[in-house]
Image (cartoon, rainbow, N blue to C red):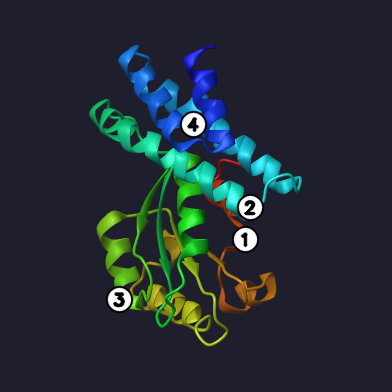
Amino acid sequence: MDILQTIYREIVEGNQVAAKEAVQAAIDANIPAEVILTDGMIAAMGEVGRLFEQGEYFVPEMLVSAKSMQLGLNLLRPLLVAQGIEPVGKVVMGTVKGDLHDIGKNLVSMMLEGAGFEVIDLGTNTTEEKFINAVNQHQPQLIGMSAMLTTTMGNMRHVITALETAGLRQKVGVMVGGAPVTENFAKQIGADGYAPDASRAVVLARGLIGLE
């Protein structure tokens, strides 16, 4: 079987060790890093997203596939950097202040990486100041905010207000998500988009930067 097909299959099936070995085999075979990324890994994560949308995959399956992709990406990233291959976009991600939940954020981050984005993950309990500093430092096209609690989701509004105060709001798209978050809430706080799950977060992110 073609090495790229093997990478594709092992990521879709969530075989972490086999996926990593297949990526290394492709590197050893001098297949260009961009081809490995696009035809093997991004294609595989696209299929994982499709399976999720159709109800054939659930969050656990998405998570193991995303982890498989990430192991391969760790091998590939230095080559991509060395070859000057640009990501499709840059996203700053964080769970908002007061909230320590990160499973959903981590899955979205991995799915975005699997779609070719560069992700700067600020972790949990992320203050407005951390978001502002990250936007100034990394110059992303997007920021993504997550909240798992009704008591912390209001902090998303504070981040957007802080972006406006810093004169950065027009420079960055804002997408939000998390269990208590709704499309309505996203509109109320002035976010640019809401995604109910990791698969649709990728579609949203691509749309916000003009790729969809």
The mark nearer the N terminus, 2 or 4, is 4
The mark nearer the N terminus, 2 or 1, is 1
Query: What is the residue that sits farthest to the right in this orientation?
Result: 54
The mark nearer the N terminus, 3 or 2, is 3
Residue at 34%, 78% (x, y): give it. Answer: 127
Looking at the image, is mark 4 or mark 3 nearer the viewer? Answer: 4
Give the quarter of the figure containing the C terminus: top right
Which amino acid, mark 4? Met
Report the disc number at residue 129: 3
The mark nearer the N terminus, 3 or 1, is 3
The mark nearer the N terminus, 4 or 3, is 4
Q: CA distance from mark 4 to mark 3?
A: 34 Å
Q: Which residue is mark 1?
A: 195
Secondary structure category for the residue under label 1? loop
Q: Which residue is mark 4?
A: 41
On screen, residue 211 versus residue 85, left or right, reads right
Q: CA distance from mark 3 to mark 1?
A: 24 Å
The mark nearer the N terminus, 1 or 4, is 4
Tell which of 77 and 188 is nearer to you: 77
Mark 3 vs 2: CB contact within 8 A: no
Relative to 50, is 146 above or below?
below
Which amino acid, mark 2? Arg
Residue at 57%, 27% (x, y): give it. Answer: 9
On screen, residue 154 versus residue 74, left or right, reads right
Mark 2 vs 4: CB contact within 8 A: no
Q: Residues within 10 Å of mark 3 (few under 14, many from 20)?
A: few
